[in-house]
Image (spheres, rainbow, N blue to C red):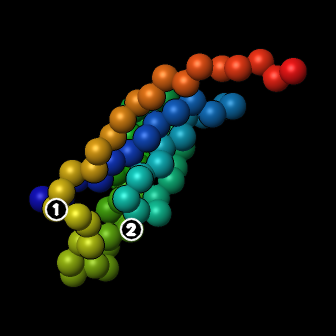
Amino acid sequence: MRRVTAYIHKGEKFYIGECLEIDVITQGKTIDETLRNLKEAIALYFKDEKEIPLSKEPPLTVTLDVKEYARA
């Protein structure tokens, strides 16, 4: 079993879900709906694949705090 990392964030009207390792993006009205949509989209993405081309090593995911600077 391999893992796919997804990033979910709030858009203007919906939550947006994006996979970091593969080209899959979806949306939903709630986080739960977005997760369900991501699972479905990932399954469709790999539907015809005999071998899933994902790294065996888990990705390193970090969150960084960035200080805002006012522009003069």
Q: Give the residue type that dot 1 points to.
A: Lys
Answer with left or right where residue 12 lies relative to residue 66. Answer: right
Q: Going from the N terminus, do you reach mark 2 or mark 1 first?
A: 2
Residue 29 seen from this side: no
User: Residue 66's x, y, as percent?
Assistant: 55, 24
**x%, y% of residue 5?**
33, 48
User: Quarter holding the C terminus?
Assistant: top right
Residue lying furthest right in this view?
72
Total tally of numbered discs in the picture? 2
On screen, residue 52 versus residue 68, left or right, reads: left
Residue at image coords 40%, 62%: 22
Amino acid carrying label 2: it is: Tyr
Q: Nearer the viewer, residue 62 or 4?
A: 62
Neighbor class of circle 1 (other Cα within 10 Å; few <14, some 14-19, many 20+) is few
The reply to whether residue 12 is in sight is: yes
Between label 2 and label 1, give the one nearer the viewer. Answer: 1
The residue under the point 57% across, 30% down is 10
Label of residue 7 in the image: none
Q: Which residue is mark 2?
A: 45
User: Residue at the spot x=67%, y=31% of the render?
Assistant: 13
